[in-house]
Amino acid sequence: MVVLCNDDVFRDSAPEHTWCEQKHLSVTSQHVEVAVCSAWMARRLTLTRILFLCIAVTFVVAVYLALAPIQEAVCTCGQQKEQNKGVNILQKSVTQPDQEDDGKEEDSHRVAVLVPFRDRFEELMEFVPYLSLFLKEQGRKYKIFVLNQVDNYRFNRASLINAGFLESRLECDYVAMHDVDLLPVNPELQYEYPQNGPYHLAAPHLHPLYHYKTFVGGILLVNNEHFEKLNGLSNRYWGWGREDDEFYVRIKKAGLQITRPGNLTTGFKSFRHIHDKRKRPRDNYRYFDQREKTKRLDRETGVATVRYLVESRRELTIDSFPVTIINIMLECNVTTTPWCLRPEDHDWYLNQAEGKGQQPNQQKAVKSPAHKPVAPPA
């Protein structure tokens, strides 16, 4: 007889019932073991998931913290750009320069290097790259203006500087009146803004050629306010020399203090002079009453009275360094300063003075006392 061990089936005899209970207990024990095993496995899987979740959360938090400073910096830059928006470019170049985050305070001033010039191209080709590198080493904001005299009068350094100041004053707030044949060698020669008065960089105790106490030529730095206060330089000095001596008197009369570099150890070797007087001799002749008329302080002419014409203006590069070439035609009143004329035109002036009415050679580009221009030579 087969007895089914089922709670729904009646048991007829005790032995079978006992066996069924034993069998039931055996099956139940197996079920308990399986249940316990399943619960343990489920708990293990839950712990693994929790551990994985913790690792994931930790990673996300670490990434967020790492990226937070970068996002803040980007936001700051954006705000800075927004603040600079709409600033006048011309004003910005003089008083609000861009600042580079290099740990140094950048100079807010900009110097106009004014270079009076005529027919000295070999020197110019060396000057522009050399001085550009020198000023960059100092972190200076600068612009080089080559003031090229293209008329047929004698050279006038002072009038060219006056014209150069008028052409550059909106871009720069101080000038360096600079000879093209004088190169600074000692890095301690600073082209800094002359706040308290003219700063004579090529001091007498440093210049390789000129050592007298009142010398202010070579390289002289003057801020725009003081240059206008002095009325610039005299326009009466045609030919080479003496205009800087007259400018020294102007400075003293105005009560401005001239400062110079300290006692540099390089002395006369602080500069390199590259002029070859054999190839280009100085025009230091004195004609008519020039010597007498240029001995005294000129109280009449200066930057306010200089007369010139900008024939052309060119932005060029020399060895990748930018330079502005301004071709300038100066005017001369031959009635007051006949020594502006070259010797070959003196006969014309004398004939005019005697009332003979002889016209100048048209190829000389000479202007009459009324400043009527004559076409320059082709």
Image (cartoon, helix red, strand yellow):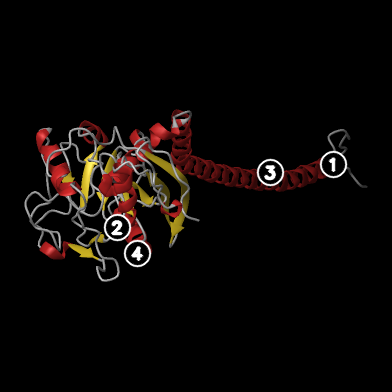
Identified by mark 2, the residue type is Val
Label 1 Cα crowd, 10 Å radius (few <14 / some 14-19 / many 20+): some
| Residue of label 1 | 5
Relative placement, left or right, of 24 versus 35 is right
User: Secondary structure beneath disc 1?
Assistant: loop
Identified by mark 4, the residue type is Glu
| Residue 236 in picture, x, y percent from top left | 24, 43
Foreground pick, 137 / 222 = 222
Whole-Å distance between the Cαs marked 1 and 3?
22 Å
Above-or-below relation of 117 to 27 = below
Relative placement, left or right, of 301 versus 143 is left
Whichever of callouts 4 and 1 sits on the residue coming sooner in the sequence is: 1
User: Secondary structure beneath disc 3?
Assistant: helix
Whichever of callouts 3 and 2 sits on the residue coming sooner in the sequence is: 3
| Residue of label 4 | 126
Whole-Å distance between the Cαs marked 2 and 1?
122 Å
Whichever of callouts 1 and 3 sits on the residue coming sooner in the sequence is: 1
Above-or-below relation of 314 to 72 = below
Look at the image and tell me whether residue 160 can be seen.
Answer: yes
User: Secondary structure beneath disc 2?
Assistant: loop
Image point (14%, 59%), residue name: 207
Find residue 194 and report its image quarter. top left
Whichever of callouts 4 and 2 sits on the residue coming sooner in the sequence is: 4
| Residue 285 in picture, x, y percent from top left | 21, 57
Q: Which mark is residue 35?
A: 3
Which residue is outermost to the bottom?
278
Whole-Å distance between the Cαs marked 3 and 2?
101 Å
Q: Which mark is residue 180?
A: 2
Label 4 Cα crowd, 10 Å radius (few <14 / some 14-19 / many 20+): some
Identified by mark 1, the residue type is Cys
